[in-house]
Image: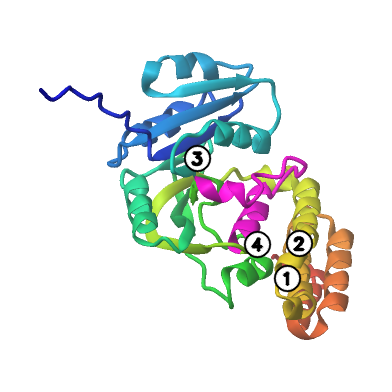
Amino acid sequence: MVEPTETAPVHPLVSVVIPAYNAAGFIARAVDSVLAQTYQRCEIRVVDDGSTDDTVRILETYGDALQVIRQPNGGLSNARNRGLAAAEGEYVAFLDADDRWLPDKLARQVAILEARPDIGFCSTRTRVEAPDGTCVGEWSCPHLEGTLLQTLFLRNGSIPGSGSGVMVRRQLFAVVEPFDETLRSLEDIDLWMRLAAVTGYVCLDEPLTVIVKHPDSMSRNLEVMRAAALRVMRKNRHLLPPKEQNRLWQAGYASVLADYAKWEYRAGRRGRAMGHLLEGLVRAPRQRGRMIAGLLLAMVRGETL
């Protein structure tokens, strides 16, 4: 007589990590977009980062469809890392509480990671919306300038969807530290740089991720974002091949200064903006000189940028 055997539990293949802080106005839309995925072998872990609104009450209405981790407010990176530490899936997909996915997003990403063991993380082309749902553009897959790592130094925002678009093999976090909790911004770009140094990446050229762009977020956080961007450039410089740690890195650093100079200028801080441009010109006169000179001239003339 053959003894019956117990069926081994099927562990979730994808862990979805959603950090949420005072997200009552939109958390249901994010969670619903995960529940509507055509790929269903996943777990949802929402980290409530000390919300004081109705976020937790709304999450409780989902019952066992998700797991809620409650903690005192520790910031975005801390909340993502808390969810990551609790994840049981082979893959981890991150989703910010005010963004959402289209139904085939997880299925398409799982398929590429299953087929390509050389690929450690992936993202998708991304639709960008205003808070009212109006489409304001698309975030395209990157045109690589050399390797992905080199491209990220030259154009920090190369990975579309970023914190809402990426799926990564969880085993990589045994090699690469998770989100840097000392950064107050650009913690996602910092992690993508470190992942790009050890594994392959692919972008699915389908708009399967939807992110919300808040018009005042850049101007409100300009100082924090600029300081974080420059710190990320400095702390990860060693990841580049030795021959690229001067010329390419300086060109990338100058590009970051130029980007934030434009935002400073739009915020009415023309003196600070021109100061950033002059520093960039000193750092990379050959690689970025023409671009920076054009920006300086436009600022002197008072043109709209």
Count neighbours of disc 1 (C-alpha within 10 A) and say few if under 14, some if 14 to 19, many if 20 or more: many
Q: Compare marks 1 and 4 and give the one earlier in the sequence.
A: 4
Tell me if 29 is positioned left or right of 87 in this view: left
Residues under numbered marks 1 and 2 in contact, where contact means CB atoms less than 8 Å apart: yes
Amino acid of disc 3: Leu
Q: Would you name the residue on which mark 2 appears?
A: 233
Residue 54 is covered by the magenta coloring:
no
Q: Compare marks 4 and 2 and give the one earlier in the sequence.
A: 4
Per the image, label 4 sits on a secondary structure element best described as: loop
Q: Would you name the residue on which mark 4 appears?
A: 156
Residue at left offset 56%, top offset 46%: 163
Tell me if 93 is positioned left or right of 35 in this view: right
Per the image, label 3 sits on a secondary structure element best described as: loop
Q: Compare marks 2 and 3 and give the one earlier in the sequence.
A: 3
Quarter-wise, where is residue 71 in the image? top right
| Residue placed most toward the observer, 211 or 143 | 143
Amino acid of disc 2: Met
Residue 175 is covered by the magenta coloring:
yes
Q: Which region is colored magenta?
A: 170-196
Q: Compare marks 1 and 3 and give the one earlier in the sequence.
A: 3
Q: Would you name the residue on which mark 1 appears?
A: 252
- The residues tagged by marks 1 and 3 sit, at their Cα atoms, a distance apart of 28 Å
Residues under numbered marks 2 and 3 in contact, where contact means CB atoms less than 8 Å apart: no
Quarter-wise, where is residue 215 in the image? top right
Q: Provide residue 287's location: percent of width, then percent of height.
A: 74, 83
